[in-house]
Every structure is written in C-alpha cells, then in structure tokens.
Amino acid sequence: MSNNILNLLNQHRSIRQFTDQPLTDEEVTTLVTAAQHAATSTFAQQYSIISITDPAIKQELGDITGHHWLEKSGHYFMLVADQHRNLKIAEATHADTTILRSFDKFLASTFDVAIAAEAIVTAGESMGLGSTIMGSILNHSQRVITLLNLPELTFPLLGIAIGHPAEQPGLKPRLPQPLMHFSNQYALPDDFDSQLASYDTTTADYYAHRNSHLKNTTFSQHIVQELQRDPKLRAELLQVIKQQGFNIDL
Ligand SMILES: Cc1cc2nc3c(=O)[nH]c(=O)nc-3n(C[C@H](O)[C@H](O)[C@H](O)COP(=O)(O)O)c2cc1C
C-alpha cells in the first residue's frame, strides 16, 4: 500500500548536515503548529517548546551533546516536559496540585514531548527539511536547566536540530517484523537466531556501504557497543528530575 504520507514516513532518515539557510519564521510557526496538533495525554498539553536562536546557547548545547553540528542547523528546538504551566493554572484555584508532581504526570509529559517531536520531524520532512532528534541533551540535564532557566516542574527531554539537508544518507534498515510485531502475546519466533543473523547481514551491509561514517559492525554488535557507554554519564538524571519538583515515587 502506498500514499504520500506512507511514503514520507517510510523514507525517514535523520539529517545531521545542513545548508546555511535558516528556517523562516513561517516555517518555525508551521512546525510548532504541527506539534500542537499531535495527540496529548488527557488534553493537558504538558510540554513546551523553546526555540534556541542564541549562538552562545547553541554552542553550549554543542558541548553538552558532543554534537557541534547542531550549531549549523537551520533551527534548534528544545522540547521540555512541562507541568509548570498547569501548576500555575491549578494553584490559582487553590486546588491540591500533588498529582502534578507524580511519576504518572512525568510520564505523560514524556509521551507528549515524544509525540510532538515526531510531528515536528515528519512535518519538517513534508516541507523538504531534515532533522535529528537529540536525546544527548540528557548528558548534562542540570546544565540545560540552568542554561534555559527552566522552572519547577519542567525538564528538558529532547532537542531537535532541523534545517535544509546537506546530505542524503541511506535508509537505515529496520528489524524484520516477526522480531518486533507479535500477535496477542509477546512471542519471539522460534527462528529468532536465524532472523537476527539475516538482519545482522543486512545492517552490516548498510554500515559498510552507506554514504559516510562507514563502519564494520552489525545490529547485534551495535546493541552491545551501546552498553559500553560510561554509566556515570547520565547518573544524575533521577536526582535532577526530583530537584525539578517531580516526585517519581508518587
Ligand atoms: C529519542 C531519540 C533520541 C535521539 N538522540 C540522538 C542524539 O542525541 N544524537 C543523534 O545523532 N541522533 C539521535 N537520535 C537519532 C537516532 O540515532 C536515529 O533515529 C537512529 O539511528 C535511526 O536512524 P534514522 O533516524 O536515520 O532512521 C535520537 C532518536 C531518538 C528517537
């Protein structure tokens, strides 16, 4: 089956090199509008978007993420979990606001941010733009909080570098569906090993022949390599989330 939207979704690739052309104000507003129309848990609209235009802030985000190429993007969005605005709304009525600090509400904010991020990525692609979602802002979340002056009950979750693409990466092959789509119950197939081996061959071929950053690796090796990341890198995460006023034990 094929239509314009399916074709767009199935052609997604993250873009990390951009031309010098910045996004226009109209393009930025269009992307934020698309994000706003995404589904939002309990219609609470519990996230905010901060456009980062200050080169000094971009540079610090480059340091935090290790992705200095973000400074060359046509625009940078920071997506923030946000129960602060709803706290203000509720406090004005003297309502009990305890639940806004709960793990459930923190999770709801993360869902809202993730769905809004995908809307920005897809809307951007429909406009000829390319982007990369960045979880690497979590490397030093307290620095991001200080940098952006984030108040109580907010937390920075994802950045998005977006702009006019200056690269055309190949399509990254995804898992065979029998390894990730089950019927009624979780059930990896009996031929898991052979299906994985086949996918490893496909991914090895992709990594060996893609346009840049050629690698000699497979999906399985990639998963294991990811485990070698310094566990101290994001060790502060839980503490910082709590410092922002979320009581995730609630
Ligand atoms: C939540 C999330 C966080 C991500 N963080 C980063 C990041 O910090 N740096 C980066 O270069 N790519 C990041 N990516 C992009 C992934 O690496 C990319 O989507 C994946 O390798 C698949 O490649 P594709 O998007 O080109 O299909 C992130 C993607 C998601 C969904």
Image: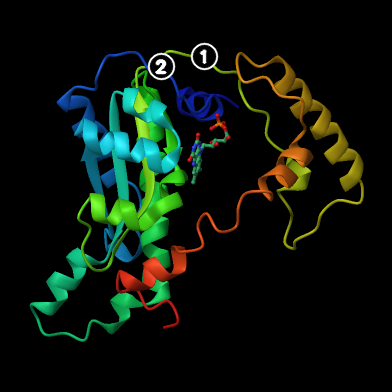
The answer to whether any part of residue 124 appears in the image is: yes
Which of these two is toward me, 250 or 35?
A: 250
Residue found 87% across the figure and 47% down from its top: 192
Q: Which image quarter holds the C terminus?
A: bottom left
51 is higher (above) or lower (below) than 149: above
Position in image of residue 215 (x %, y %):
71, 24
Mark 1: C-beta under 8 Å from nearest atom of ligand 1: no
Quarter holding the N terminus is top right
Residue 136 in the image, given as x and y percentages of width and height = 46, 44
**Could you tell me if the residues under marks 2 and 1 are in contact, i.e. CB atoms within 8 Å?**
yes
Name the kind of residue labelled 2 in the image.
Answer: Pro
| Residue identified by numbered label 2 | 165
Measuring from the top left, give residue 199's x and y in whole percent.
80, 33
Q: Is residue 75 above or below residue 94?
A: above
Point 8% across, 77% down: residue: 92
Mark 2 element type: loop
For numbered disc 1, what is the local secondary structure? loop
Q: Determine the image quadrant of residue 122.
A: top left
Left or right of residue 237: residue 20: left
Residue where numbered disc 1 is placed:
168
Where residue 152 is drawn, which disc sits there?
none
Q: Residue visible at 74% across and 37% down?
A: 219
Q: Give me the residue at 32% from left, 27% from top.
A: 71
Quarter of the rendering containing residue 166: top left
Q: Is residue 87 left or right of residue 59?
A: left
In the foreground, 35 or 223: 223
Q: Is residue 55 left or right of residue 114?
A: left
